[in-house]
Image (cartoon, rainbow, N blue to C red):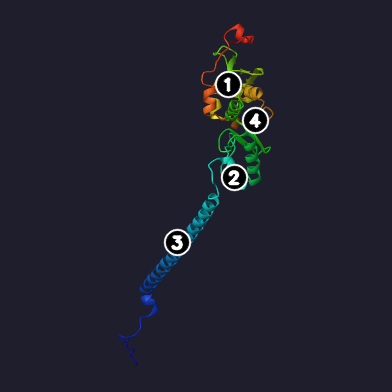
Amino acid sequence: MTITTKSPFAKPSSGSSAPERQQSTGQSELELGAGLTLTEQAQSDTALQKAALVRADKAADRKKQELEKLAGISSLDWKAIPPPMLAQILVNIPFKGATGEPDYYLQPWQAMIFAIRAFELGLSPFSNEIWFNPKNNKTNISFEGKLKLARMNGLNLSPPIFERIPEDATKPLVAYKCTINAPHGKCEYTATMKEWRVSTSPVWRDKPEHMLQLRAAEKCLSFATGSGSSELMGEQDLATGTESARFMDTPTSFVSSPQEKNGDMK
């Protein structure tokens, strides 16, 4: 009879050591996987750093080129800036869109139209005195700009006189009538809530009386000065500043006497 003895040095069978071998293999794969992940992460970090450096270098080059272009400006007077350079500056300035509309930037050719018209009017394209309407590619003069033009042209205008319609402040506002005395005569305009109220504007909701007075004065001023009376109106026309503050400082809110109603104002 043959007796088979198991050598103490024999390799373990696959059945008896499978769990141990699987655990060993699993650990090796985990360690290997972790090593590859770290390597890939290091490579990714290096690539990101290189990309960031490239972007920074490009940005620095662009900034340097822009500064070199601006070096050609020899005066802070906007009228002395070369037209192409002026257009390049204007295309980087956002225009405030109407309520519910996004801000917008001018195209180079629009910037040139805007600059040319600003030069003709003598109003700065960097102020709130004028604005560019991309819907019809026209340069509009704001309330502030019209007041400045009147002063520049020596027009002696009276303060605005407002008549609320109806006069009873406890009743809903319907309209405001504005009267301005100009050298060539009396100018009047009645702005109605139905025509001018912007329901989506928070300012119109909070200050309807003030906004309607401002709209009435702006349109009346257009007739008094002869500027912008045929333009397509926008919310930007109501832009105000130092000229507007001086003009609207102490307006008459109500017409209180028959003489004033008949136009016999002192």
Who comes first in sequence, dot 3 or dot 2? 3
* Mark nearer the N terminus (3 vs 4): 3
- What residue appears at the point 58 percent right and 16 percent down from the top-left corner? 161
Residue 86 numbered mark, or none:
2
Please tell me whether residue 243 is drawn above or below residue 102 in the rendered image.
Answer: above
Q: Are marks 3 and 1 in contact (CB under 8 Å)?
A: no
Crowding at dot 4, Cα within 10 Å, few <14 / some 14-19 / many 20+, comes out as: some
- The N terminus appears in which quarter of the rendering? bottom left
Q: Residues within 10 Å of mark 2 (few under 14, many from 20)?
A: some
Task: Please state the horizontal and vertical placement of residue 258, each as a whole percent of the image.
Answer: 61, 6
- Check disc 3 and give the amino acid type: Gln
The residue beneath circle 4 is 233
The amino acid type, in three-letter code, at marker 4 is Met
Label 1: which secondary element: helix
Q: Which residue is mark 3?
A: 49
Report the disc number at residue 213: 1
Assess disc 3: are there few (<14), some (14-19) or many (≥20) residues with their C-alpha within 10 Å of its C-alpha: few
Decide which of tag 3 and tag 1 comes sooner along the chain: 3
Whole-Å distance between the Cαs marked 4 and 1? 16 Å
- How far across and down, in percent of the image, does residue 10 sit? 34, 85
Q: Secondary structure at mark 2?
A: helix
